[in-house]
């Protein structure tokens, strides 16, 4: 798919067909994640693939915003492998994880897979349910699957702030 079409047509899908994603499709999405830029190329991202009936059922105990998706990816970051900004100690790994997640969403759209970025999940429940190590922080949950016939963007999807409210040249 042409990039402009991918970014224009992508929306948060909240209604899915029940089938899991084929391994080949999962691998394409993961490859896009692997190619994402990270601070000093440290690659602190850790991605949990949730694509079986058992793992999807476990996920449902960690978030109410699963939208009955047949698959999901939990994008995390290892804070011990993060680049650290020397001026204030800020870690790049949370941002790295967001960049990785964005690559995954766009790759999913390119493969005809619907996706919804979910921030409403219980990190402690995720950690316990999926045995996530202490140094690994869950950052974003991407619920995915093939969109149902009734899937459509929410009305707010088409609402954007004017460009001059969010973009500034030379100073604020």
Image (tube, grey):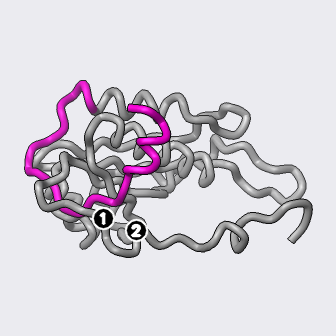
Residue 38 vs residue 133: left or right?
A: right
- Residue at numbered disc 1: 153
**Mark identifier at residue 157:** 2
> Is most of the magenta stretch helix, strand or loop?
loop
Percent position of residue 68, x then y: 15, 61
Residue 80 vs residue 50: left or right?
A: right
Q: Nearer the viewer, residue 77 or 16?
A: 16
Label 1: how many Cα within 10 Å (few below 14, some 14–19, many 20+): few
Does the residue at mark 1 contact the one at mark 2 (Cβ under 8 Å)? Answer: yes
Task: Give the position of the N terminus as an image quadrant.
Answer: top left
Eyeballing the image, is 145 above or below 129? above
- In magenta, the rendered stretch is 1-25
Name the quadrant containing residue 87. Answer: bottom right
Percent position of residue 141, x then y: 37, 57
Eyeballing the image, is 19 above or below 128? above
- Residue at 31% across, 52% down: 115
Residue 111 vs residue 68: left or right?
A: right
- Magenta region includes residue 135: no
Q: Nearer the viewer, residue 115 or 119?
A: 115
Q: Nearer the viewer, residue 151 or 26?
A: 151
Q: Nearer the viewer, residue 53 or 17?
A: 17
Task: Give the position of the C terminus as an image quadrant.
Answer: bottom right
- Residue at 36% across, 57% down: 11
Please tell me whether mark 2 sits on a helix, a strand or a loop: helix
Whether residue 46 appears in this view of the structure is no
**Mark identifier at residue 103:** none
- Residue at 39% across, 59% down: 117
């Amino acid at each position: 798919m042409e990039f402009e079409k991918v970014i224009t047509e992508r929306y948060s899908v909240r209604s899915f067909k029940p089938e899991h994603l084929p391994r080949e499709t999962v691998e394409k999405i993961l490859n896009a994640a692997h190619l994402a830029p990270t601070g000093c190329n440290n690659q602190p991202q850790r991605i949990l693939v949730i694509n079986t009936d058992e793992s999807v059922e476990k996920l449902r105990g960690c978030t109410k915003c699963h939208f009955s998706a047949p698959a999901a990816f939990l994008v995390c970051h290892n804070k011990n492998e993060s680049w650290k900004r020397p001026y204030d100690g800020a870690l790049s790994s949370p941002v790295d994880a967001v960049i990785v997640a964005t690559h995954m969403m766009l790759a999913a759209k390119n493969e005809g897979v619907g996706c919804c970025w979910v921030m409403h999940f219980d990190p402690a429940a995720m950690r316990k349910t999926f045995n996530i190590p202490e140094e690994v922080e869950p950052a974003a949950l991407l619920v995915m699957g093939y969109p149902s016939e009734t899937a459509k963007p929410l009305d707010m999807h088409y609402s954007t702030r004017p460009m001059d409210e969010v973009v500034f040249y030379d100073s604020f």
